[in-house]
Structures are given as structure tokens and as C-alpha cells.
Amino acid sequence: NLSQGLDCNGQPPTAEQILTEADLVTSTLYAVLTAITLIGNLVYLEEVLYLVRKIPSFRRTAYIWITGAPPVIATTSCVGLWIPRSSMFTDFTASIYFTICIYKFLVMIIEEYGGDEAIVQTLQDVPVKISTGPCCCCCLCLPSVKMTRTTLSLLKSGVLQVALLRPILLFFAIVLWSNGNYVEGETFSGTSVLKPFLNGNPLITVIVMLWATGCLYCSVCVNDLKCFCGNCIFLFLFQSVLILSQAQSGIINQLVNTGIVECVPPFSSKARGTFMNQQLLVIEMFVITLVSRCYYRRKYSSVELKPAVPEKEDLKV
């Protein structure tokens, strides 16, 4: 712990206060987390070089973007640890990058199948199960739907909504914070109509995104993409990054609001919650980076290295 310095209701400490007031335990913690972040970035750079040499271009770009999410999130979290008052800006930066990753992930699934038209025509007779987790797994009575252009558009919207809403709401949060109307992690007090959306958005959007991803991914797996969908580690890694980076902060904020996470000067309870989230993210993203390296440095089959391009007659209406 740092020495007593700030009021529990005050702002997070500055970088100078952390450097001057840190004891041996805190200094060791910062050194270890910073070293983990640097090692994770080096592992990612080595992974990129491998992907550039071994993976064809139609899949390489998406792989590089998606595997870059853990080290980018770890780096922004590490910056937030050293400069606690920058946490909203580092979260915004990580959200912008992850927005691109979500888009690349969706495009990769679609392109693996040959495009929107190929998916609709190939899966038009395959029922799409919507009673999937995490929000509808208990609703077994929900009927399956046919794969149509409308269904595909709704599933794509469910995936992309978290990529759009999270950065937009974080932008408004920064604007409100700069005007003194918003404190990160605070509960809704009625002073801004955006506060309930800012507080509840991460968990809700992540749940919807996981549901839409599950529906789309499972529908595609039913048919031809066995080489792509058979290894569920890819989907597991992507969803792990999504849950930890987007939903974990919302859970910790709820613990702060209920008084479970208490004030430890110089950190207020809200700043301490953010501090805990950033520590966890650095460690979690490092583990995911190592797992990703093991997954992507495997031997690819000849089928996996070929793009799934449908025949022209299959695309005719």
C-alpha cells in the first residue's frame, strides 16, 4: 500500500505521487507488471513475424489485428497504472483498437464462407439456433429461425454494436468528466441522462455480442468450415479478451458501488477499483498472449491455408 496522502473522495494520485510515496512492495508490483507488459509485446512482435512468413494474406491481416488485442490492452492498462488519472483515456484507446478487432473478426468469418450471399444461400435450409448463451441458454422454447439476409444482418449488428457503442459512450464519458459532471464508476445520480447508459453499457453490450457471435459461429460451423470452426480455441481466445476487457470493469464498478472495494489512501474506492482492474488486465492479457502464441504457431493444414471461394453457380439467385 501507498502511504496516506489523499482524501478518499479525491482524485486518483498523480504519477509523481506514486513514484515518491511507493514502498518496496508497491515498487516491486509496478516493476513486475511493467516487465510482464514488455515481455507480452515482444512475444506479440515475434508472433507477427511468424504469421507474416507462414499465413496467406487473406487471413494474415485479421490474425495480426486480433492477436494484437491482448498486448495493446495490457499496454494501455500499464500506462493507466503509472498515470491513474489517464484511465479514461487509456480505456478509450483500447476500445478503439478492439473495435477494429471485432470488425476484422466478423469480416474473417464472412470471408471464410465466401461472403454474405454465400452464407445465406448455403445455410438457407439450416435452422439458426437462437437459444444460446449467455442470455438465452435457458430459453429452450425459443424457435430456430431460417438464415436469411435479415437474420444475417441482425446477427452482424449484434456483433458490431459493442464495437460502436462502447467507444461512443466512452467519448461522452470523457466529455462529461472534463466538465465535472461524471466520475468513472459512479452510480446514476440524475445529473446526466447518459449516466445509466455509461454504467450499464459494458455488461449489456458484451452479453448481446456473445449471444450474436454464438448464433453466427454455430450456424457457420454446422456446414463447411470444419477446419476453421473445429478448433474452438480461436473463438475462446477472442471471447476471453472481450469479456475481460469490456465486462470486468463493470463488475468491479458494481463491487465499488456496493462498498465491497473500500478506500485505501491515496486511492479512493473508485480509483482503487480501476487500479485493481488494470492490474488484473495486465496479468490476464499476458496469459492470453502466451496462449495465442501457442495456438497460432501450430502446423496449418493445406485446407486452412486456402480461401473458401464459392463456385460462381452457387452465387446465382
Image (cartoon, grey):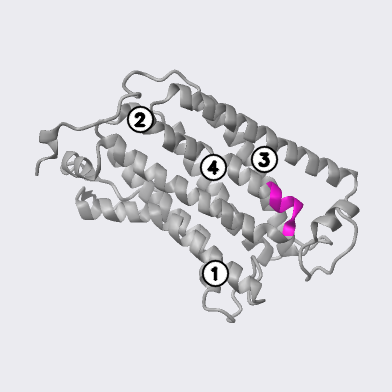
Q: Earlier in the sequence, mark 2 or mark 3?
A: 2
Q: Nearer the viewer, residue 139 or 283?
A: 283
- Residue 191: give x, y in percent of width and height: 59, 81
Q: Residue 69: which numbered mark, if any?
A: 4
Of marks 2 and 4, the one in the foreground: 4
- Residue 293: give x, y in percent of width and height: 55, 28
Residue 187 shows up from this direction: no
Of marks 2 and 1, the one in the foreground: 1
Q: Which residues are magenta?
A: 78-84
Residue type, mark 2 in image: Phe
Q: Which residue: 60% across, 67% down?
A: 174
Q: Residues within 10 Å of mark 3 (few under 14, many from 20)?
A: some
Vertical relation: 190 (above or below) 251 = below
3D distance between C-alphas at marks 4 and 1: 23 Å
Q: Which residue: 60% across, 73% down?
A: 176
Element marked by disc 2:
helix
3D distance between C-alphas at marks 2 and 3: 28 Å
Question: What residue did someone put label 3 on?
Answer: 283
Residue type, mark 4 in image: Ala
Residue type, mark 3 in image: Ile
The quadrant in which the C terminus is found is top left
Element marked by disc 4:
helix
